[in-house]
Amino acid sequence: MESKWQLDFLILDTIASVKRGLGVNELSRILSGKVSKVKLIEEIKKLREEGLIKVKKDPKHKQRSLIVVDEKILEAFDNVKINGGTVRDIGNLSEKLRSYIVTCSSYISTITNPIVKKYATYRLLRQFSEIMVSILGVKGEFDF
Protein backbone atom coordinates (compact mmCIF):
# COMPACT_ATOMS: atom_id res chain seq x y z
CA MET A 1 0.00 0.00 0.00
CA GLU A 2 1.36 3.40 -0.94
CA SER A 3 2.07 5.42 2.18
CA LYS A 4 0.72 8.55 0.48
CA TRP A 5 -2.77 7.04 0.79
CA GLN A 6 -2.47 5.76 4.39
CA LEU A 7 -3.47 9.06 5.99
CA ASP A 8 -6.21 9.68 3.43
CA PHE A 9 -7.68 6.24 4.03
CA LEU A 10 -7.47 6.64 7.81
CA ILE A 11 -9.40 9.91 7.46
CA LEU A 12 -11.98 8.30 5.14
CA ASP A 13 -12.38 5.34 7.52
CA THR A 14 -12.91 7.65 10.48
CA ILE A 15 -15.50 9.76 8.67
CA ALA A 16 -17.31 6.72 7.22
CA SER A 17 -17.63 5.18 10.67
CA VAL A 18 -19.98 8.02 11.70
CA LYS A 19 -22.88 7.96 9.24
CA ARG A 20 -24.10 11.49 10.06
CA GLY A 21 -20.63 12.87 9.28
CA LEU A 22 -18.10 14.68 11.43
CA GLY A 23 -17.16 18.29 11.98
CA VAL A 24 -13.52 19.27 11.49
CA ASN A 25 -12.92 19.77 15.22
CA GLU A 26 -14.51 16.44 16.09
CA LEU A 27 -12.46 14.67 13.40
CA SER A 28 -9.32 16.41 14.65
CA ARG A 29 -9.99 15.20 18.22
CA ILE A 30 -10.53 11.61 17.05
CA LEU A 31 -7.30 11.65 15.02
CA SER A 32 -5.33 13.51 17.67
CA GLY A 33 -1.76 12.22 17.79
CA LYS A 34 -2.00 10.78 14.28
CA VAL A 35 -2.25 14.01 12.28
CA SER A 36 -2.00 17.72 13.08
CA LYS A 37 -5.08 19.88 12.55
CA VAL A 38 -3.28 21.89 9.83
CA LYS A 39 -2.36 18.70 7.92
CA LEU A 40 -5.88 17.35 8.46
CA ILE A 41 -7.42 20.45 6.88
CA GLU A 42 -5.04 20.12 3.91
CA GLU A 43 -6.05 16.48 3.48
CA ILE A 44 -9.76 17.30 3.79
CA LYS A 45 -9.39 19.89 1.02
CA LYS A 46 -7.58 17.36 -1.19
CA LEU A 47 -10.13 14.60 -0.54
CA ARG A 48 -12.95 17.03 -1.32
CA GLU A 49 -11.30 18.06 -4.61
CA GLU A 50 -10.95 14.36 -5.49
CA GLY A 51 -14.67 13.87 -4.84
CA LEU A 52 -14.12 11.37 -2.02
CA ILE A 53 -15.78 13.51 0.65
CA LYS A 54 -18.47 16.17 0.70
CA VAL A 55 -19.27 18.97 3.10
CA LYS A 56 -22.89 19.50 4.12
CA LYS A 57 -24.64 21.77 6.59
CA ASP A 58 -25.32 20.29 10.00
CA PRO A 59 -29.12 20.28 10.43
CA LYS A 60 -28.69 20.74 14.20
CA HIS A 61 -26.28 23.72 14.02
CA LYS A 62 -26.71 26.46 11.41
CA GLN A 63 -23.07 27.56 11.43
CA ARG A 64 -21.50 24.11 11.51
CA SER A 65 -20.64 21.88 8.57
CA LEU A 66 -20.27 18.13 8.53
CA ILE A 67 -17.85 16.13 6.42
CA VAL A 68 -19.34 12.98 4.89
CA VAL A 69 -17.80 10.40 2.58
CA ASP A 70 -18.89 9.89 -1.01
CA GLU A 71 -21.41 7.08 -1.61
CA LYS A 72 -18.75 4.90 -3.29
CA ILE A 73 -16.49 5.16 -0.24
CA LEU A 74 -19.42 4.44 2.09
CA GLU A 75 -20.30 1.37 0.00
CA ALA A 76 -16.71 0.13 0.25
CA PHE A 77 -16.70 0.83 4.00
CA ASP A 78 -19.92 -1.17 4.45
CA ASN A 79 -18.84 -4.06 2.21
CA VAL A 80 -15.35 -4.56 3.62
CA LYS A 81 -15.93 -5.17 7.32
CA ILE A 82 -16.47 -7.93 9.77
CA ASN A 83 -20.17 -8.48 10.38
CA GLY A 84 -21.02 -8.74 14.06
CA GLY A 85 -19.07 -9.73 17.12
CA THR A 86 -15.39 -9.96 17.78
CA VAL A 87 -12.92 -12.44 16.40
CA ARG A 88 -12.96 -14.39 19.66
CA ASP A 89 -16.73 -14.89 19.17
CA ILE A 90 -16.25 -16.59 15.80
CA GLY A 91 -16.71 -20.36 15.99
CA ASN A 92 -14.88 -21.88 13.03
CA LEU A 93 -12.25 -19.17 12.67
CA SER A 94 -10.37 -20.43 9.63
CA GLU A 95 -13.57 -20.91 7.59
CA LYS A 96 -14.92 -17.52 8.67
CA LEU A 97 -11.65 -15.79 7.75
CA ARG A 98 -11.50 -17.54 4.38
CA SER A 99 -15.11 -16.61 3.66
CA TYR A 100 -14.52 -13.01 4.76
CA ILE A 101 -11.45 -12.62 2.55
CA VAL A 102 -13.12 -14.25 -0.47
CA THR A 103 -16.26 -12.11 -0.07
CA CYS A 104 -14.28 -8.89 0.31
CA SER A 105 -11.92 -9.77 -2.54
CA SER A 106 -14.85 -10.53 -4.83
CA TYR A 107 -16.41 -7.18 -3.97
CA ILE A 108 -13.10 -5.34 -4.48
CA SER A 109 -12.65 -6.91 -7.91
CA THR A 110 -15.90 -5.24 -9.06
CA ILE A 111 -14.75 -1.71 -8.17
CA THR A 112 -13.78 0.35 -11.22
CA ASN A 113 -12.63 3.58 -9.54
CA PRO A 114 -8.90 3.07 -8.75
CA ILE A 115 -8.93 5.21 -5.60
CA VAL A 116 -12.02 3.48 -4.21
CA LYS A 117 -10.39 0.12 -5.05
CA LYS A 118 -7.23 1.11 -3.12
CA TYR A 119 -9.40 2.28 -0.21
CA ALA A 120 -11.34 -1.00 -0.12
CA THR A 121 -8.04 -2.95 -0.24
CA TYR A 122 -6.74 -0.79 2.63
CA ARG A 123 -9.90 -1.62 4.63
CA LEU A 124 -9.45 -5.34 3.99
CA LEU A 125 -5.80 -5.23 5.09
CA ARG A 126 -6.63 -3.11 8.14
CA GLN A 127 -9.50 -5.38 9.17
CA PHE A 128 -7.31 -8.45 8.73
CA SER A 129 -4.56 -6.79 10.76
CA GLU A 130 -7.04 -6.07 13.55
CA ILE A 131 -8.18 -9.70 13.48
CA MET A 132 -4.59 -10.92 13.84
CA VAL A 133 -3.81 -8.44 16.63
CA SER A 134 -6.95 -9.60 18.45
CA ILE A 135 -6.03 -13.27 18.07
CA LEU A 136 -2.47 -12.68 19.23
CA GLY A 137 -3.55 -10.42 22.09
CA VAL A 138 -1.01 -7.69 21.38
CA LYS A 139 -3.26 -4.62 21.43
CA GLY A 140 -1.58 -1.27 21.05
CA GLU A 141 1.73 -2.70 19.91
CA PHE A 142 1.08 -2.31 16.19
CA ASP A 143 -0.24 0.61 14.21
CA PHE A 144 -1.57 -0.22 10.75
Image: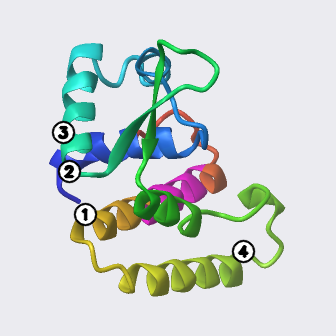
Mark 4 sits on what residue?
Answer: 93
Judged from the image, the secondary structure of the residue bearing numbered disc 2 is: loop
Kindly identify which residue carries mark 1. Answer: 115
Whether tag 4 and tag 3 are in contact, CB under 8 A, the answer is: no
The residue to which callout 3 is attached is 46
- Please name the residue shown 53% across and 86% down the image: 102
Q: Looking at the image, is mark 4 or mark 1 nearer the viewer?
A: 1
Nearest to N terminus: mark 1 or mark 3: 3
**Distance of label 3 from label 2 (alpha carbons):** 6 Å
Is residue 111 toward the left or the right of residue 97 in the image?
Answer: left
Please tell me which of labels 2 and 4 falls first in the chain. Answer: 2
Per the rendered image, the range of residues in magenta is 124-133
Along the polypeptide, which appears first: circle 4 or circle 1? Answer: 4
Residue 134: x, y in percent? 64, 50
Q: Is residue 144 visible?
A: no
Which amino acid type is shown beneath numbered disc 3?
Lys
